[in-house]
């Protein structure tokens, strides 16, 4: 079923900040209107300074994704990094080039 979470990882691992340096990314990935990177948390750290939570602390979640061309949908995923305001969710959706998506915490709820 499209849009469902699959714990499998991509063949090529992402950079430490869960981004892919593929030049096609902006041209091929649909625009996500509610994507939001945390620039600083309450301690002054950038998102790239946040480590993945240990596997036992990661959470199965539902994330609200607002695609510019298709509208709003909810996807299953796994919250792997977060701070007070933002969450990095691992999702498996064919519309997305990268399986990692940063959104505001208000767009994520536990399963």
Image (cartoon, rainbow, N blue to C red):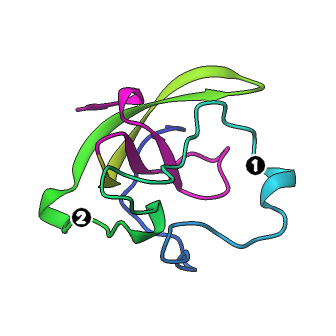
> Could you say where residue 17 lies in the image, as x and y percent from the top left?
50, 69
Question: Which residue range is magenta in the image?
Answer: 84-111
Residue 53 tag number: 2
Q: Is residue 62 visible?
A: yes
The answer to whether 63 is drawn above or below residue 96 in the figure is above
Is 111 located above or below residue 54 in the figure? above
Which quadrant of the figure has residue 104? top left
Tag nearer the camera, 2 or 1? 2
User: Residue at horizontal 61%, vertical 26%?
Assistant: 66
**70 or 105, nearer to the observer:** 105
Residue designated by label 1: 29
Secondary structure at badge 1 equals loop
Q: Position of residue 42 (x, y in %)?
A: 31, 50
Does 7 sit left or right of 9 as displayed? Answer: left
What residue appears at the point 48 percent right and 77 percent down from the top-left corner?
16
Secondary structure beneath label 2: loop
């Amino acid at each position: 079923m499209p849009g469902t979470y699959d714990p499998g990882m991509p063949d090529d691992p992402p950079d430490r900040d869960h981004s892919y340096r593929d030049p096609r990314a902006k041209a091929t990935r649909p625009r996500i209107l509610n994507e939001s990177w945390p620039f600083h948390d309450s301690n002054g750290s950038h998102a790239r300074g946040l480590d993945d939570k240990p596997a036992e602390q990661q959470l199965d979640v539902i994330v609200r994704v607002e695609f510019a061309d298709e509208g709003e949908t909810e996807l299953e995923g796994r919250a792997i990094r977060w701070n007070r305001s933002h969450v990095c969710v691992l999702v498996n959706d064919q519309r997305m080039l990268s399986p990692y998506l940063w959104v505001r915490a208000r767009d994520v709820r536990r399963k």
